[in-house]
Amino acid sequence: MDFLSRYDLLGAFWVTVQLTVFSAIGSLVWGTVLAAMRVSPVPVMRAFGTAYVNLVRNTPLTLIIIGASLGLYSTLGLALADDTSGTFLKDNNFRLAVLGFVAYTATFVCESLRAGINTVPVGQAEAARALGLRFGQTLGIVVLPQAFRAVIAPLASVLIALTKNTTVASAIGVAEASLLMSEMIENESDKLFLVFASIAVGFVVLTLPTGLLLGWVAKKVAVKR
Amino acid sequence: MSAPSVLYDAPGPRARARNVGYTVAFCLALVAVAWFVLSGLNDKGQLDGQLWEPFVTDSRIWSEFLLPGMGTTLQAAAVAIVIALPVGAVFGIARLSDHAWVRAVAGVVVEFFRAIPVLILMIFASEFYFLFTDVSADSRPFWAVVTALVLYNGSVLAEVVRAGIQSLPKGQSEASLALGFRKTQTMTLILLPQAVTAMLPAIVSQLVVVLKDTALGGALLTLPDLLSQYKLIANNYNNTIPTLIVIAVLYIAINTVLTQLAARLEKRLSRRGRPPAGVREDHIEQQDVHLAETKTGDASGA
């Protein structure tokens, strides 16, 4: 086991966790905005939401991440970090990857939320309108809070998928777990199974409790009807 | 219902004026983003006709790069799903076995492969084939990608199969057992055929996932798939950004066709009065799911 101490496993998984957490927060926000657009009274917003979701969801994540690096940074010059700092490349690639994950994962958050909105009884929205609430109020105060409670389980699946998807960031050189795995395999090919097991266990440790915890939360907060 | 949505009233004069305001503001924002992107591309000369021309004028860009790449992508996805389906069926049925140890083993295997990223499996499979088999270096990435996709999607499909079988009315297996069918016969003749029809949309949706995941092999192993062609084309024509855009359009086109197919299958199947309940997490096309469920509960015999 001493060879494991030669590699910074915890550090690599820490990057994975950071990628996951930042992307999760971003995609929850952007996904909610997209869902609101798709049910909004403004036709242009509905059209944009639909087009965005259908285009981005059908693009491979790998292509989005590479596109973020080559397109946004190399071509459009969109630097997301201070380019005088010593860690510019590392920070910039990390943030570009987060941006790509947010753009991609938000489409799944949006679709889950829309399904959740459909599970809220029509009477709720009708009552809200009868009380004189506007669209923003109906959605924000009455419908979405109930929808969120209904979609915790699907959102947990999205979060777990996101955790696993962060490995794609290695395509633009973010030093997360899968990049470390490639490096370890290159140097220690005789310990292939040990390397695989240690990385796999890391991901199981990350994803399994997430699923169990959020499954429990989903049951706890589900709206009894 | 006269209103277009339950979420807002039919707009009156003030709401219409407000919506026009939102429309204008939103369009301006979109135009601003589009201008930033297009002017940025233009500054770098990425919109020059000569970078885009080859896609129309030079047939070699299609015959030597894009189409073979697309072929590899489709081939890897097809082989993976064809192997993953029976694997998924076996593990899905095993998870419903009467023997506790079979359920436990299948459960651990399925949960393990669902919990770890496909990319990790690909890297592992590639090295595994390199060390322990004599698969040639050329075809190693292909089989590594296929192996990883089979392991992952087999586990996902196992859950789909399990949910599909569990969603069938209990009377189906009871009636079959009462007629004297064995457990195997009940499963293969009665339950599985019905479950597979209900699962079809989920299976087609999974095909989209498989297709997108093959791109991992292109970027991080050396699979000569559609995505990986961007490097080769850019080397020859020096047009990275246009190539990436064309490749993205191709992926979107293929996947949109598959997504539409899944949606149409789902609509057709739910018209038969037996919605694939529990198979998919989201029934987006169905308005007011809670109402639909109470209705189909009685009409399931239709």
Image (tube, coloured by chain):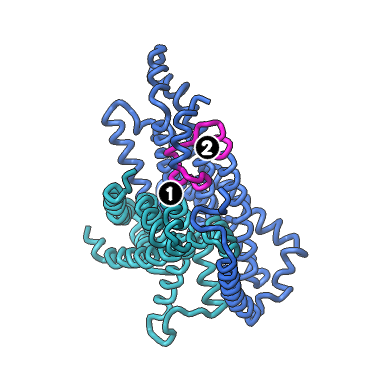
Residue shown at 22%/57% (left/top)?
A1
**Circles 1 and 2: CB atoms closer than 8 Å:** no
- Which of the 4 quarters of the picture holds residue A144? bottom left
- Is residue A204 among what the camera can see? no
Residue farthest to the bottom, as pictured: A84
Residue shown at 77%/64% (left/top)?
B57
> Which shade is chain B?
blue
Residue farthest to the left, as pictured: A2
Q: In this image, A50 relative to B238: left or right?
A: left
SS majority, magenta? loop
Q: What amino acid type should be assigned to the residue bearing mark 2?
A: Leu
Q: Quadrant of the C terminus of chain A?
A: top left
Give the chain of mark 2.
Answer: B
Give the chain of mark 1.
Answer: A
Vertical arrangement, residue B181 with respect to residue B89, above or below: above
User: What percent of the width, then of the height, locates residue B212?
Assistant: 52, 53
> Which residue, given by chain and number where applicable, does mark 1 sit on?
A123
User: What percent of the width, then of the height, locates residue B155?
Assistant: 40, 42
**What range is drawn magenta here?**
B266-289
> Which shade is chain A?
cyan
Q: What amino acid type should be assigned to the residue bearing mark 1?
A: Gly
User: What percent of the width, then of the height, locates residue A92?
Assistant: 43, 76
> Which residue, given by chain and number where applicable, does mark 2 sit on?
B200
| Depth check, front residue: A72 or A90 | A72
- Is residue A38 among what the camera can see? yes
Residue shown at 59%/41% (left/top)?
B264
